[in-house]
Image: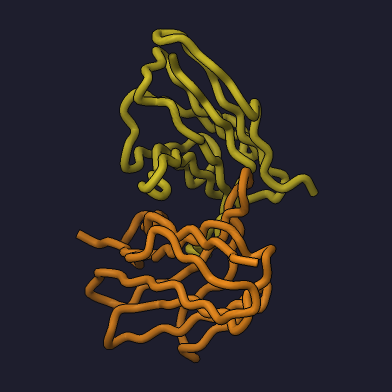
Chain colours: A orange, B yellow
Amino acid sequence: AQSVTQPDIHITVSEGASLELRCNYSYGATPYLFWYVQSPGQGLQLLLKYFSGDTLVQGIKGFEAEFKRSQSSFNLRKPSVHWSDAAEYFCAVGLMDSNYQLIWGAGTKLIIKP
Amino acid sequence: NAGVTQTPKFRVLKTGQSMTLLCAQDMNHEYMYWYRQDPGMGLRLIHYSVGEGTTAKGEVPDGYNVSRLKKQNFLLGLESAAPSQTSVYFCASEPGLFSYEQYFGPGTRLTVT
């Protein structure tokens, strides 16, 4: 069965430090790939997406993600985090034969140390 | 544009009571979804709709019903609430045509005692 794995439940990073959040998926073909962010008490917002083409994609709020086909990964990065980046981050995949559904990871909670 | 709105924001029910959660979107999106979010489990799809008058089951549909009588509204009903339905419920909409870009409401926190 298709699945999305975010191996880190929590990550703590100092303000100004770089960030990488991991996402791996299990699917036979290349899916559509997404990162969403959920700020405390709010709904989810799309950060960035990958459909095809350049494997390094830029998103909002200074985030980027790189698709690596050989590793079935779509890791999210930011060179320097800000306190306002504290949130929960969800990776999701859209499968071409999924009947319109996204498959979601369990989320990674980002904690920023001052 | 208000985007996606959800009513109510909070609710406490007793076991066996019923209620309806309302989701409304003003973006003329074709697809709408209801998810539940529980700690450590990410989002789980309850039901979805790909157009006015159509609904389909998601991953965890038991105990819930939905209706989409108007394109802009998607209702989620709990006929007989159970403590296992304590969760945060999110509605989302999507333009359609396999865009996969979902726009979320702020959520409804439901507690069943």
In the image, residue B87 above or below residue A104:
above
Is residue B95 among what the camera can see? no
Residue B17 placement (x, y as % from top left): 46, 9
Q: How many marks?
A: 0
Q: Nearer the viewer, residue A30 or A21?
A: A21
Quarter occupied by residue A45: bottom right
Outermost residue toward the left in this view = A1
Quarter holding the C terminus of chain B is top left
Q: Residue at x 70, y 50 (%)?
A: B27
Can residue B49 be seen here? The reply is yes
**Residue for point 57% across, 54% down:** A38
The answer to which of B71 and A62 lies nearer the viewer is A62
- Relative to residue A67, is residue A95 depicted above or below? above
Q: Is residue B9 left or right of residue B20?
A: right
In the rendered view, does B49 fall on the left or right side of B40?
Answer: right
Residue at the spot 19% in from the left edge and 59% down from the top edge: A1
Quarter assignment of residue A86: bottom right
Q: Could you say where residue B81 lies in the image, as x and y percent from the top left?
A: 41, 16
**Looking at this rendering, what residue extends furthest in the bottom direction?**
A54
Residue B23 appears in which quarter of the rendering?
Answer: top right
Residue farthest to the front, as pictured: A114
Picture coordinates of residue B32, whole percent (x, y): 53, 45
Q: Is residue A52 left or right of residue A69?
A: right
Q: Residue B46 placed where, x, y %?
A: 39, 38
**A44 is higher (above) or lower (below) than B62:** below
